[in-house]
Amino acid sequence: MTDPLPRPVPRFWHLWAVLAVAATFVLLAIGQMVTSFGAGMADRVWPTEPWYVFHTATDTEKARFKEEFGFFIEHSHRIAGWTVGGLVSVLAVGLLWTEPRKVVRFVSIGALVLLLASYGDFHRGLMAQRDVSPRAVTLPAGPMWKAIASAAVMIAAAASGAFVGARGAGIRVLGSLALVAVMIQGLLGGFRVKLNELVGADLAAFHGVFAQVVFGLLAVLAAYTARPVAVAGDPAAARRLWRWAVLFAHLIFLQVVFGAWVRHFPAPLPQRLHFLTAFLATAVAAWLIRAVLANPDARRRAGRAAGVLAGLIAFQVYIGVEAWLAKFGAYRPPELVPVTAETGAIRTLHALVGSGVWAMSLVLAIRLRPAGVPTNTTEPVDPAWPGSGPRAAVGVLSGGAK
């Protein structure tokens, strides 16, 4: 049996990454409840502090927090967002600290600290205008440009390791991108509230889709920080199976996008696309899972991920039928169908299991990636950066041994 490759980062940061994924899953669950129960505009005040409803709210608003379900889940969603932001910030600091070049390490962490400070100033600048009409709000330009510049320096410093063969460069880039993505997602959620009267609820769909991008980034990060396992079988067969897994992950993301389209804009076209893509994704998943379990080497590296994915897809098919009947089986326009506790829970669960399928498709692709297969006889692949080495620096899912 082939020995596993060494860990790309200390085990503690892998566990922290898993914690961040779990917290983001809870955040997604609450966010899906916000959509299912139409609570996106339960509170039109934004930005707010995490403790807004406990210390700065009026007595009436405190009562609403306790008595109105929409107000409760909307602010629970915001608090969960702050929590995920904190976890990902700590994770990014920890991963950047693994940079072996001392100067680059301090440059990247210094840029991260400046990014957090600038983001905080930007947030406070908007908070000072939260009672202003959306048409009169001005973006705090100084903090915004400082945040953009800091993010660029942080990502560039992390990526520079790929060009000198520094171990773990890919993971540091992913950690930096995940932090920036979480910040963007927070702003998308806030602007969805602030700009509702100007552009309507359209931003809610973008907010929902980008949430899946953030969740996927964190799932990829958790998978890459785990200990990789080298290929023991035929490298060519391993690469072919991995490419199918990458294709499947892209297909699932497309299905997630169509699902968000149906939830926010239930027109005939997105309904058809969501249905057709579901059939295709299920067929590809069945073939891929069978191929993984039938191949001893692939089963050793990704059998557990394939098993979890199979269970999620089976449940998703069932709950998808129930969600469809709840929304479109009442023989009336979907916007006129009342949302009950049961139908809201079914829709939320369907969307949430879809997020789980999306994350596990990424994990499966990463576990099947042919890590440890040399690009030549002298240059092994760095498990922390697909296709890394002095001569190769490629994308997270599109890389690997050639």
Image (cartoon, grey):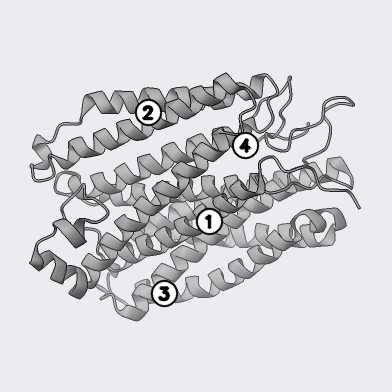
The answer to whether 324 is drawn above or below residue 166 in the figure is: below
Q: Nearer the viewer, mark 2 or mark 4?
A: 2
**For the residue marked with disc 2, what is the amino acid?**
Leu
Looking at marks 3 and 2 on the same chain, the residue that comes earlier in the sequence is marked by 2
Q: Is residue 18 left or right of residue 61?
A: right
Looking at marks 1 and 4 on the same chain, the residue that comes earlier in the sequence is marked by 1
Q: Position of residue 188 (x, y in %)?
A: 31, 44
Residue at x-position 57% and y-position 60%:
357
Q: Which residue is mark 3?
A: 346
**What separation in Å lies between label 1 and label 4 (alpha carbons)?**
21 Å
Residue at x-position 48% and y-position 55%:
256
Q: Nearer the viewer, mark 1 or mark 3?
A: 1
Q: Quadrant of residue 179?
A: top left
Q: Quadrant of residue 371?
A: top right
Q: Nearer the viewer, mark 3 or mark 2?
A: 2
Task: Rate crowding at label 3 as few (under 14), some (14 to 19) or many (20 or more) other CA atoms within 10 Å.
Answer: many
Q: Which residue is mark 1?
A: 19
Q: For residue 396, which numbered disc appears in the image?
A: 4
Residue at x-position 19% and y-position 35%:
125
Name the one closer to the observer, 312 or 247: 312
